Amino acid sequence: MMIPTIINEVEEKVYSDGTHIKQYIVHAPEWDIYYDKLDGKARGDKIDHFMISESTRCGYLETLVFPCDAEGKCTKMIDVAGGRNRTADEILTSFALIMMEAGYDTI
């Protein structure tokens, strides 16, 4: 299955000023992301779990994706995906579309 499985919603908090933080953990071994990938060859440890963090606390919408373990503990704060003005759902949908274009069955 290519669409990442949401394991745990870690936090969803809406503040009095209307801003929010939403975080959850996904299991996505299909993303084929490694801590160190050089010259197109995978080196280092493969990452299978990710924390997706969507926030508007800085005055704009930004979603960052960090590697973590199955419990959601981030040992390296390396942003591996995401971006400004994109929701967490948009990040996951974009990935699913890329996988479908590459010929993978995403369902």
Image (tube, rainbow, N blue to C red):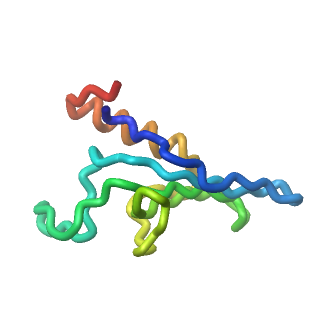
Residue 34 appears at what percent x and percent y? 25, 63
Residue that sits furthest to the front in the current view: 71
Judge by depth and name the residue closer to the eye, 50 or 7.
7
Residue at 43 percent of width and 66 percent of height: 79
Residue 66 image-quadrant placement: bottom left
Q: Quick one: 16 or 71, which is closer to the camera? A: 71
- Kindly identify the residue that appears in the image at 22 percent across and 34 percent down: 102
Left or right: 97 as drawn, with respect to 45: right
Quadrant location of the N terminus?
A: top left
Q: Is residue 48 left or right of residue 13?
A: left
Which residue appears at 59% of the width and 58% of the height?
62
44 or 10, which is in the foreground? Answer: 10
**Residue found at x 45% / y 48%:** 26
If the image is split into quadrants, where does the C terminus sit?
Answer: top left
Residue 92, how many percent across, how many down?
45, 42
Tell me residue 53's x, y (percent). Answer: 56, 58
In this view, the residue farthest toward the right is 16
Vertical placement of residue 100 versus 24, above or below: above
Q: How many marks?
A: 0
On the rendered structure, is 72 left or right of 67? right
Q: Check the image and report above or below for 67 versus 23.
A: below
